[in-house]
Image (cartoon, helix red, strand yellow):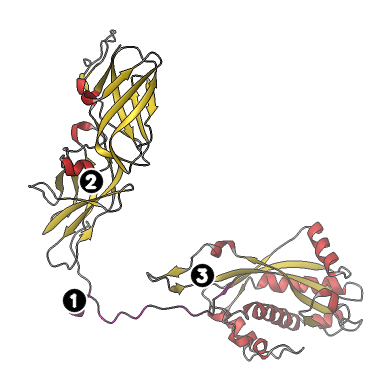
Amino acid sequence: MSSPLAIAGVTHVLRDLLNDGVVDHDVAAAIGAAISVRTLPPDRLQNVASDTSPVLNVFLHRVTPNTGWTNQELPVRDARGNLVSRPLLALDLHYMITAFGFDDLHGEILMGYAMQILHENPVLSRAQITRALSPAPVIGGGFPPALEALDRTGLADQFEQLRITPDYISTEEMSRIWTAMQTQYRPTTSYRISVVLIESENPVRNPRPVLTIGPDNRGPTVIPSLTPPFPFLNRIILPANQPSVRLGETFTVEGRHLDGLTVEARITHARLPQALVLAPDPGGTARVVQFTIPDDATSATDWVAGPALLSLLVQRAGEPAPRETNLLPLLIAPIADFAAAIVVSAATEVTIDLPVRPELRDGQEIALTIGSETALAAPLGAPQAASASFTFGAIAAGSYPAWLRIDGVDSWLILRDLPPQPPDFEPRPPAFDPAESLAVPV
């Protein structure tokens, strides 16, 4: 990769290319005077050029990031936060080629040859860069010694070659540039050199080399199969064609390589500090495993309704640690005991105290829907609670379908008898399971 001296190295290589081209084309004979190629700002060059010495000047007027390499890579750190690699600094260099001549047509002749030379060399080869920078050119003007060692730029070694392309700019922009330099305008054209890749010099921690591969240095293990040998989950089949699972229900997990010495499910919930662990039901295979969520007093307090993530830990023979599968979403539905609900009806409002399993957690979004009316639960007042209170407006006496929603997951709402197939389109009120309905007294 290139060092920070690469920008100066590109300028010198470009000057050397133009100087060799002027000599090869014998431009001095066409003009009748010796020609010098300089790399000065145009305002300073006004004092250097003379009537007998036309000048072809190379001036770096702008540096821009290269869009193709800017997002190529990001800084990489290891597990401890130590920097392993740094991204490269990718730059495009924009140059102004200016012809200073004091006799008729001198500027036009110099500009024509300069553009021909750059057109014939669209790519700076590694041999051209090495020849221009080795041995290191002598730079005067009191520059630091580091700038006198342009042979260490690394330009010839970077894996992206330097390309020369015309970079035509508008008359307005050219006018602003020359106005900013506070000097008289001369015939000028612009070129872009792309791309210069500068590597950071800050130290990084490199990983140690690999000395052995596999047990007893036998190399990697090869398995004759297109299927990866690691446990993987494809889908979760929930009971009763429902989108969620409740306490006491059994769900099925399908995947591959799910068999092992021990298999357990890990259910991670945002409301719980630790993951819940489930043992599989008997009869699991490498492709299908079933799990049953317990429904007892402990489960009612330990489990939480709402969205969760499921993964399996599979300990296989001969492996030192269990492997964890990918994660799949699992919705845990609340169970509302509508039969035990305490409903108090007044003239202007209806208050409902509803028991819920598993227990509710402070901070959960809890909503109850009765028919077409929805109400939010009152604050629990405790970290955990076995019931929630809801206050509705005036509701006419009757029996309504009801369901509970906790953190976006609804309780089950089951039709007791489904309409015929195909439907007969006759007015027919749906019949709900009494366990999923709530009666509002007069």
Give the residue at the far left of this rendering.
Answer: 283
Image x and y of residue 140, in percent? 75, 90
Magenta stretch secondary structure, dominant: loop
**Mark 1 and mark 2: Cα distance apart in space:** 43 Å
Q: Estimate how packed mark 2 is, as few (under 14), some (14 to 19) or many (20 or more) residues with alpha carbons within 10 Å.
A: few
Res. 12 image quadrant: bottom right
Q: Name the N-terminal-most of marks 1 and 3.
A: 3
Dot label at residue 302: 2
**Mark 1 and mark 3: Cα distance apart in space:** 35 Å
Position above or below: 158 against 267: below
Q: Amino acid at mark 3?
A: Pro
Q: Name the N-terminal-most of marks 3 and 2.
A: 3
Image x and y of residue 58, in percent? 75, 75
The residue located at (91%, 76%) in the rendering is 102
The residue located at (41%, 78%) in the rendering is 206
Viewer-proximal residue, 436 or 314? 436
Name the residue carrying label 1.
215
Dot label at residue 87: 3
* Magenta-colored span: 196-219
Q: Amino acid at mark 2?
A: Asp
SS class of the residue under badge 2? helix
Position above or below: 189 against 202: above
Res. 361 visible in picture? yes
Q: Estimate how packed mark 1 is, as few (under 14), some (14 to 19) or many (20 or more) residues with alpha carbons within 10 Å.
A: few
In the rendered image, the quadrant that contains the C terminus is: top left
Residue 418 sits inside the magenta stretch: no
Q: Name the N-terminal-most of marks 1 and 2.
A: 1
Q: Amino acid at mark 1?
A: Pro
Viewer-proximal residue, 403 or 214? 403
